[in-house]
């Protein structure tokens, strides 16, 4: 990680955490997903799981990853093939429903490859971060340095 690395928060609520730390995926059709274009090799991504994610990691930061490659655009079928290859045998009806609800209305997508996933053990719950982090619907956003410092220290 160089001194120019940026820090990001991925906010997601997938049915399982199989792809967390491996890729970032978002539609490319709307302006509020443009942060995917700003991600650079070497940037750090912290992974926050919303209340829609699986227990026992709901409402927690579960780890961090390093950006391996900047965003690449895919069509719907290409993105689904890529995500299914990451999920593997755990692709099931929960993932089918998630993909349909989350991505079914879009035609083009960004995928950012990640590497070096480091799981936080234990996950860092939201309640510990009150006043420093408030979840928003934004999938990928810049991480404030105060939050980065807390996550790096394990709080």
Image (tube, rainbow, N blue to C red):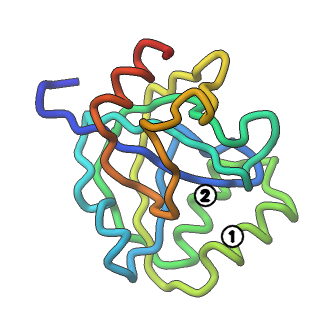
Q: Residue 121 appears in which quarter of the rendering?
A: top right
Q: Which residue: 47% across, 30% down?
A: 64
Helix, strand or loop at label 2? It is helix
Work out which quarter of the rendered image holds the N terminus and state it: top left
Instruction: Give the number of the disc on residue 19.
Output: none
Residue farthest front in this picture: 131
> Horizontal and vertical percent for residue 39?
27, 50
Are circles 1 and 2 on residues that touch, CB within 8 Å? yes
Q: Between residue 13 and residue 66, name the one nearer to us.
A: 13
Residue 50 picture location, percent across and down: 65, 50
On residue 99, which mark appears? 1
Where in the figure is residue 145, as x and y percent of width and height? 27, 31
- In space, the residues marked 1 and 2 are separated at their CA atoms by 10 Å
Q: Position of residue 116 (x, y in %)?
A: 45, 25
Q: Is residue 110 left or right of residue 16?
A: left
Crowd tier of the residue under label 1, counting other residues whose Cα lies within 10 Å: few below 14, some 14–19, many 20 or above: some
Q: Residue furthest left?
A: 4
Q: Is residue 17 toward the left or the right of residue 54 in the image?
A: left
Seen in the picture, residue 45 relative to 100 is either above or below; the reply is above
Q: Which residue is mark 2?
A: 83
Q: Residue at x 37, y 81 (%)?
A: 30
In the structure shown, which secondary structural element does the residue marked by tag 1 occupy? helix
Which residue is pictured at 34% across the width and 62% down the height? 72
């Amino acid at each position: 990680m160089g001194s120019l690395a940026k820090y990001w928060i991925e906010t997601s609520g997938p049915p399982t955490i199989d792809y967390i730390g491996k890729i970032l995926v978002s539609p490319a059709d709307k302006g509020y997903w443009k942060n995917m274009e700003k991600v650079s090799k070497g940037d750090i991504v912290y992974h926050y799981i919303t209340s829609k994610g699986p227990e026992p990691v709901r409402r927690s930061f579960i780890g961090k990853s390093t950006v391996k490659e900047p965003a690449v655009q895919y069509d719907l079928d290409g993105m689904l093939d890529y995500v299914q290859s990451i999920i593997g045998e755990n692709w099931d009806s929960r993932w089918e429903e998630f993909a349909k609800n989350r991505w079914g209305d879009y035609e083009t997508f960004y995928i950012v490859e990640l590497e070096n996933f480091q799981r936080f053990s234990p996950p860092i719950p939201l309640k510990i971060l009150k006043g420093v982090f408030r979840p928003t619907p934004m999938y990928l956003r810049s991480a404030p340095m105060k939050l980065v410092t807390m996550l790096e220290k394990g709080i």
